[in-house]
Amino acid sequence: MITDAFQFSRLPLIHFGKGKLGLLPGLIKKLGTNIILVTGKRSFMGSGEAANLLNMFWEEKITFQRAVIEGEPSPEAIDIAVRGLEGEGFNVVVGIGGGSVLDAGKAISAMMHLSGSVRDFLEGVGRSEHPGTKISYIAVPTTSGTGSEATKNAVISSVGESGFKRSLRHENFVPDIALVDPMLTISCPEEITAASGADALTQLLEAYLSVKASPYTDALALEGVRAVTKSLLRCVADGSDIEARTGMAFAALTSGICLANAGLGSVHGFASSIGGMFRIPHGVVCGSLMAEANRVNVRELRNRRDGDWALRKYSCLGRIVSGYSGRTDDYYIDSFIEYLTELVQELKLPLLSEYGIGTQDILKICDATDIKSNPVALSRNNLSEIMSGRL
Ligand SMILES: [Fe+2]
């Protein structure tokens, strides 16, 4: 489908490639020398790369204060971090970590010039509109998943009975610089590599199949999917495979650009509702549901007369994963669903029930699931079916 009207958001200045972390002090110094360094509790700061980086900061007279983020950021975590950093004249925020850390850094940079809680500005939660003011932000991912280094939103969670998982969003929140060095993902553990990779693949697929997709996002999404098919299982089998790690870093970055411009589908609708109610990693929800959700999409599209554009896209995906030419569209579409089903098994992605989600939760979750840009409208029964297949 050619979309005759679309918009494409700004991109960060992207530095991509093995060893690019060495550019960070120079990039920071162009913006100032007093920084907020947002990291997770352990992972990156315990690594050899961190020791080298801090040494370079010292040599370049870059001073920093750390904000430490544990798990997916809550409104309280952001507010506490911002309050602890106020009044110090910071020039730039640097987030180094997985998707949660990068989102936290994005939110901190957006809240440094504002009073009140970040909760007031969250979509569907707060009542205030964010003016888009922020401190410059440099995002440095250490996992290959959310693509937060290229998106305009930060996901903030409050988990519980009346919990939520919502975005702080503004065009200005696209990071100023995305520094993507695949070497930083080498030490990412197997299960996080698998779940993060499944998140990136889901984002590529949902953006490609979105009703808001454009020729630009389609071209990027297909390149991202090709990279995933060549790299994800290799990364999981051998975390030190730098060629495969580079492929997944590319796929994740690309998935962020695609989702920022084409939106997402049913799996990310579930990720938001389930993530607000249960403590379950975002990538696990995505990976666990991706095959079921696409199977239901295809069946519903085949039952309709207006879904040919999306079925042609599924066929194109099947051509990429099957490697065969000269087969029918139906063959390719079925091959693609089979590929996803096998991939979920090979990645050993857990069932949702392993996180305490049961059949008694299905209706509550389906009612709270808001699906934005799926290629086909799904009923409550369809959503229930997708979940039931993963309990
Ligand atoms: Fe995601």
Image (cartoon, rainbow, N blue to C red):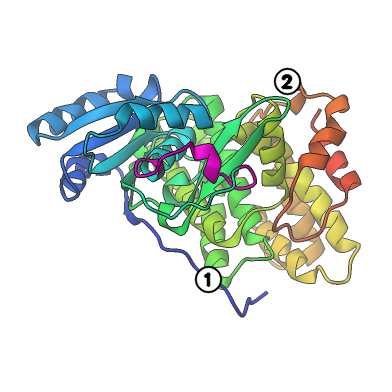
Q: Quadrant of the C terminus?
A: top right
Position above or below: 103 against 150: above
Q: Quadrant of ligand 1?
A: top right
Left or right of 39? Residue 284 is right
Q: Secondary structure at mark 1?
A: loop
Q: Main secondary structure of the magenta part?
A: loop
Image depth: mark 2 or mark 1 in front? 1
Q: Quadrant of the N terminus?
A: bottom right
Query: Looking at the image, is mark 2 or mark 1 earlier in the sequence?
Result: 1
Q: Is residue 358 left or right of residue 204?
A: right
Measured from the top left, where is residue 129 in percent x and y? 52, 53
Residue type (three-letter) at the residue carrying disc 1: Gln
Q: Is residue 388 visible?
A: no
User: Which residue is found at the position 60% from the left and 35% from the top?
Assistant: 283
Q: Is residue 384 magenta?
A: no
Q: Residue 139 placed where, x, y %?
A: 36, 43
Query: Which residue does the numbered mark 1 point to in the structure image?
Result: 7
Type of amino acid under label 2? Glu
The alpha-carbon separation of the residues under discs 2 and 1 comes to 40 Å
> Does the residue at mark 2 contact the one at mark 1 (Cβ under 8 Å)?
no
The residue at which mark 2 appears reads as 354
Label 2 Cα crowd, 10 Å radius (few <14 / some 14-19 / many 20+) = few
